[in-house]
Image (tube, helix red, strand yellow):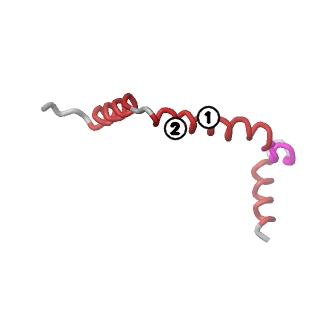
Amino acid sequence: MSQQSFWHRAYHLYIDGFRQMTLGRTLWLVIIVKLIVIFGILKFFFFRDYVSEHAQEGQESEFVAGEILQSRQ
């Protein structure tokens, strides 16, 4: 038996596992679609860039620090 590196064996383990999956492929597709919806579509439509709208150019870090300190009081 030849000595293969850990990375080589791990790579073959995952490749063989993904090759034999049936239900898992569908589940991975659902996960990927959900991530695209959450991070792509929802962010684009519902989360605006609050800092750039309210802070002056170059003063973003001071604005964020001030907002954090005000919320703690």
| Image point (80%, 59%), residue name | 67
Q: Which residues are magenta?
A: 47-55
Disc 2 target residue: 27
57 drawn magenta: no
Res 14 quadrant in image: top left
Disc 1 target residue: 33
Does residue 32 appear left or right of residue 47 in this picture? left
Does residue 23 appear left or right of residue 55 in this picture? left
| Image point (79%, 65%), residue name | 71
Label 1, secondary structure: give it.
helix
| Image point (22%, 32%), residue name | 4
Q: Position of residue 26 (x, y in %)?
A: 51, 33
- Return the residue nearer the eye: 12 or 21: 21
The C terminus - image quarter: bottom right
- Return the residue nearer the eye: 36 or 69: 36
Q: Position of residue 12 (x, y in %)?
A: 31, 31
Point out the frontmost of discs 1 and 2. Answer: 2
Mark 1 or mark 2, which has the lower sequence index? 2
| Image point (61%, 34%), residue name | 33
- Return the residue nearer the eye: 42 or 71: 42
Residue farthest along the bottom direction in this orientation: 73
The N terminus - image quarter: top left
